[in-house]
Amino acid sequence: MTWTQNFTPITDNLVLSSLAALIPILYFFWALTIKRMKGYMAGITTLLVALAVAVLIYGMPAGKAVMSASQGAVYGLLPIGWIIITSVFLYKMTVKSGQFNIIRSSVLSLTEDRRLQALLVAFSFGAFLEGAAGFGAPVAISAALLVGLGFNPLYAAGICLIANTAPVAFGAVGIPIIAMEGPTGIAAMEISKMVGRQLPFLSAFIPLYLILIMTGWKRSLEVLPAILVSGFSFAITQYLSSNFLGPELPDILSALVSLFALAIFLKFWKPKTIFRFASEETAAAVEPLTTAEAETKYTKWQIFHAWSPFLLLTLFITIWGMNPIKPALSGHYEGNNAWLGGINEIGKLLTFQIEVPGLHNAIIGSDGLPIAAFYKIELLGAAGTAILLAAIVTKFIAHMSAKDVYSTFVEAMKELAKPILMISAVVAFAYVTNASGMSTTLGMTLAKSGDLFPFFAPVLGWLGVFITGSDTSANLLFGSLQKVTALKVGMEPVLALGANSSGGVTGKMISPQSIAIACAAVGLAGRESELLRFTLKHSLFLLLLVCVITFLQNGVLSWMIP
């Protein structure tokens, strides 16, 4: 039996139908911001509300609604959940083996100037952690590092939250971009290209903006060469990697290039004066390691050895995304190479595409055609599997025992159980809103904004990240809505999706979850409101920049759309 979507179920009235479609979204906002539910509980109960609206108001058969939720939940577990687990597992292995201490020392031993420390730690090193682990680790670790160097705790937390703007869209090995492919049907690579043609403008500006916040214009000019090296090396690498490699590596590669470019630059250039905060009693209030001391403690080989797990991660993910290796890993290789043919056979065995019972081709969409619905599971071709292989090799590099590796994996699984449950619930909710027609209803309403929608598209992403604390969740929440609305107003859908993700990064610094993590990391629990006041104006300003960029790309700069 097929069922046809009805986009105006309440007396054929678009406004009333839109209000009904908003119920699950408004409930989700209420659950997190006012009721302050745990994330996973907010996700699960929102899914239940969405199912109720789909069945009772939109007339969707209950069985089809439940099966659409199951399709989303499976996608939330693989590939998204698998990437999260393996990324955090690899990161935790470097911490437990002691390699992370060497990484940290190698970053902090380069300069005593607070401005340059902020660029190295908050911007470059924080971006690296965002790409490798994400989920609160970048701000928590980089803020704690800055406090250890002598930064005021509140200031350190604020600087790290603002610096974390540049990498969020490609965080945790590209999950925010990858997550949008499922519910929107637009390839992650295309979305990656679009975001990679928006964020680099912001990424090049953030280092200068950070130092301006810290010291003002005059002091910023003193380190302008370092600012340019840091920002432009990051932005250029972010553009190239997002447009030619995919969404998994832009953060990791950009951060490494920026980090090493600035580190090498500081070997040949130093600011005329060493900047320290006025609150510090003496110039030597808190002395970091000097370069000579660091080299005595750790040799260049030890530093390379410590960074090798993340270099391996970069290598494996690059291989996994290359043609024709990528199709072979998923069992779709059609060439004559015997070696790739063998991988292709293994890929076929480990790739499953199963019709969703009672849902596949059982819903008639807005175009009058049946909508296909599959559980798609790629075990070998998933990016998470590439990360797992990097972790396995790291076991031998770091000389960890099998027992320690196992305990680390179990620890990561326990730590991530509830976040993954939340993500699966949010993905399930996104699939229900799509299958029932709720997102189309909202898109039809937003389309009334006409030519102004490209300007406001990033605001949806900003609002989503502010509420959920995650660019991934915001993309899942509003991705389909952005696509539908873009089609209604004549905007390229991929531009709207890119705007959602790019706008979302500016909301990360004011998200209640991010604020809480940052305060906890620097010992300021209970002072979250102060930190929010510090970051709010910067969040709104950076959001405005993304809105302007998106509006221009929809018009005079349309040649930038892939």
Image (cartoon, helix red, strand yellow):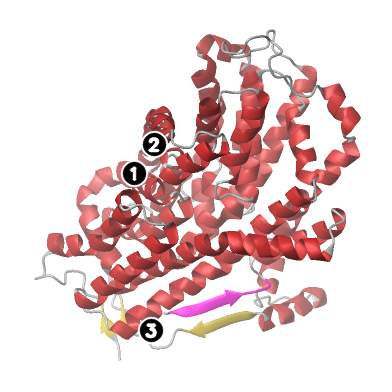
Against 363, residue 501 (above or below) is above
Give the residue displayed 36% in from the left and 80% down from the top: 66
Report which residue position mark 3 lands on: 359
Q: Earlier in the sequence, mark 2 or mark 3?
A: 3
| Residue at the disc numbered 2 | 543
Q: Is residue 373 above or below residue 277?
A: below
Q: In the rendered image, is residue 203 in sight?
A: yes
Identify the element where label 1 is drawn: helix
| Residue 384: x %, y % from top left | 65, 64
Amino acid type at mark 3: Leu
Quarter holding the N terminus is bottom left
Asked if the stretch drawn in magenta spans residue 336, the answer is no
Instruction: Tell me if residue 324 can be seen.
Output: no
Q: Position of residue 227 (x, y in %)?
A: 61, 23
What kind of element bears circle 3? loop
Which sits in the foreground, 414 or 260? 414
On screen, residue 547 above or below 440: above
Q: Which residues are magenta?
A: 373-380
Q: Which mark is residue 459?
A: 1
Mark 2: amino acid:
Leu
Q: In the picture provided, is 91 more to the left or to the right than 296?
A: left
Give x and y (percent) for residue 151: 60, 23
Magenta highlight: main SS: strand
Determine crowd level at label 3: few under 14, some 14-19, many 20+ residues with C-alpha closer than 10 A.
many
Q: Residues within 10 Å of mark 1 (few under 14, many from 20)?
A: many
What number is the disc on residue 473?
none
Crowd band around label 2 with a 10 angstrom C-alpha radius: few (<14), some (14–19), many (20+)? many
- Three-letter residue code for mark 1: Val
Which residue shows up at 26% across the image and 74% down it? 52
Q: Give the side of residue 328 with respect to residue 361, left or right.
A: right
Viewed as shown, does residue 138 lie left or right of 48?
right
